[in-house]
Amino acid sequence: MSAPDANGGSGRALSPSAPNDRGRPSAPKPKIGVFKFASCDGCQLSLLDAEDELLAITGAVDIAYFPEATRAVMKGPYDIGLVEGSITTRHDANRIQQIRRQCRTLVTIGACATAGGIQALRNWKDVDEFVRAVYATPQYISTLDLSTPIEQHVRVDFELRGCPINKHQLVELIAATLAGRKPNVPAYSVCLECKRRGNVCITVAKGVPCLGPVTHAGCGALCPSFDRGCYGCFGPMETPNTTALIARFRALGQPDDQTSRAFRGFNAWAWPFRKASDDAERT
Amino acid sequence: MTRRQSRTIKVDTLARVEGEGALFIRMRGEQVTDVKLRIYEPPRLFEAFLRGRHYDEAPDITARICGICPIAYQMSAVHAIERALGLEIHPANRLLRRLFYCGEWIESHALHVYMLHAPDFLGYQDAIAMARDHRAVVEQGLRLKKIGNRIVTLMGGREIHPVSAAVGGFYKTPTKRQLRELVDDLQWALDASLATVRFAAGLEFPDFDQDYTFVALSHPDEYPFNEGRLVSSRGLDIGASEYEDHFAEKHVEHSNALHSTMKGGASYLVGPMARFNLNFDRLPPVAQEAAREAKLAVPCRNPFRSIVIRGVELVFACAEALRAIAEYEPPPEARVERPRRAGVGHAITEAPRGILYHRYEIDADGLIVSAKIVPPTSQNQKRIEEDLRAFAPTVVNASLEEATWRCEQAIRNYDPCISCATHFLKLEIERT
């Protein structure tokens, strides 16, 4: 394979079907906005990490608002709003209301937007003490006591799980929304993905505590495939049996404070994990 | 607008940077009276909630500071904790960590060169618009980026927040055969990186040489990733544990990110330009040759040329990845035993954007007592403001729109990662 010469400029013509060819306005394309709150930028980066699909996506939709990728800004309303990050300031609590009004379909992408993120660990503590621990002049810092998910503030049409989200699920979500169908994003546990990969169960075979049985699928059972227990970055599956899992961890000899910490991770504020972490801490 | 009038350059949302920031410059005639790079990214308070967590969790938790350079956080975390525990990792794992870092540099530099920075030089709002006229260029950048991500995914399961990095080594190490599958791609990537240097060298650069203090890791026989002394272009030469004796953080009102300075208040520059200037002779011959062909001076003092240097570092990262794969023999065990002991450990590694400092204090149960993290963008923040102070007068005759764009470009020279810069550290209090 030979490397193309980057100086060659535009070697290939645009496909004739590509709309919005320069100087030739055509029917408006659906508009996507990407909005960021408290987060690491990783979930929106997933869109740029879809290297094979990116140019096809931008042929089918207008990236109308996406500061990480473009200076250009198109005014709302937007057909799809992708929201990354959790609400941690008063200003952001107001901003999400405005964004909701601008978006026909609003989708949260990732654990911060869907569950409050790792920064929700403050929710168990005194946030003023946290700020004092980090900043020399705490009075410059304005932050809320809680880090909360988007759905605690506005109606959310769909939630993509994960810390980070799976980029293939993101592409599927955009395609499905444009086609007016429900995205094909399975809601079962990581255990099923592990079985499908043919992994030997690390809890059964090696006694390694694993959150797979209570965690939403989507990663493809990555951690067990790397010889470690799932750490729950896709958050709780539907109706997870955390009580049984806590008992199982205890039988494996894992101290309860460690079990509590395991649930208090990237989806700590999601109700089933929050309750499980408190249960394990209390006992 | 005439040159005598006062005017204000204001950008409420900086684009093509990672995270949320704003720019404010006030000028009277050619005189800059105020410059503020305001980081309003909400604080996430990592150092506070790391307390009480087990050290094994630190690489996964700190990775979430930044989705663009999670491996940098994982590497600084594991090395600092290993020092606290007095651990030596197996040489094979040392080599694997270099390979892992190559993947992140390739992915991050390709993203910045092609998607975030090149559009400024060629006059496009973004890479998508640029692709309409320069599709082959953008496709080359995307493929290069994908190959960096492929290394990370093979070694860590996914490109963002990979899961394999562990204190003491890795949770699981790849086989030789798995790594060999990367070779064809990397050979293409090496050629594409050389083409990247030629492409970047052909762009137009303003004359803007500045007097910088460059700070980077330096290792006797390799271009730095995870190991080395911290050196500067003004004679600093220290170990990671001495970092806090020589650098200080200051909390300024307009930013949620702390400004780092040398003790005494002077700014400094970290990142590709600092690494290149301080370690040029440790680049492999293919990268040195590419730099010479691109007419890069050593030292290079023009930050707009950092796009060319990122190209040279892409060449290095591809060549280094190929070397690592060729030399790799799997370690006898993925991870060495961790002793039970309390301790304090420091580490500095070279994130794509520059040095990333971590310090952890750990108790005998393995729980973190205190943590300190200093990311590259907070270290560059003061220097970025100084660049803008010097640069804004050079665009005084341009339209406000053009001047604003050029100032944004001057910020993007640093590939700033604002998500990283906001969260911050336990400080020795400095009130003004």
Image (cartoon, coloured by chain):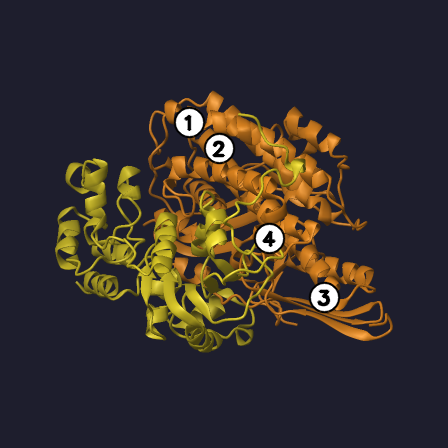
Chain colours: A yellow, B orange
The dot on residue B401 is 3
Q: Position of residue B145 (x, y in %)?
A: 52, 41
Q: Residue at x 69, y 35 (%)?
A: B198
Amino acid type at mark 4? Ala
Residue, disc 2: B99
Up-down relation of residue A248 to residue A195 (above or below): below
Query: Which type of secondary structure does the marked residue at label 1 adopt?
Result: helix
Residue nearest the observer in this picture, B337 or B4: B4
Using the numbered discs, state the Cα–Cα distance from disc 3 to disc 4 in whole angstroms.
19 Å
Asked if the residues shown at circle 3 and circle 2 are in contact, with their CB atoms under 8 angstroms apart, the answer is no
Amino acid type at mark 3? Glu
Q: Earlier in the sequence, mark 3 or mark 4?
A: 4
Residue nearest the observer in this picture, B431 or B177: B177
Q: Residue at x 55, y 61 (%)?
A: A67
Amino acid type at mark 2? Leu
Asked if the residues shown at circle 1 and circle 2 are in contact, with their CB atoms under 8 angstroms apart, the answer is yes
Which numbered disc, 3 or 2, marks the residue closer to the eye?
3
Up-down relation of residue A145 to residue B370 (above or below): below
Which numbered disc, 1 or 2, marks the residue closer to the eye?
1
The answer as to whether the residues below labels 1 and 3 share one chain is yes
The quadrant in which the C terminus of chain B is found is bottom right
Residue A164 in view: no
Residue, disc 4: B129
The answer as to whether the residues below labels 1 and 2 share one chain is yes
Q: Is A247 on the left-hand or right-hand side of B241?
A: left
Residue, disc 1: B179
Query: Which type of secondary structure does the marked residue at label 3 adopt?
Result: helix
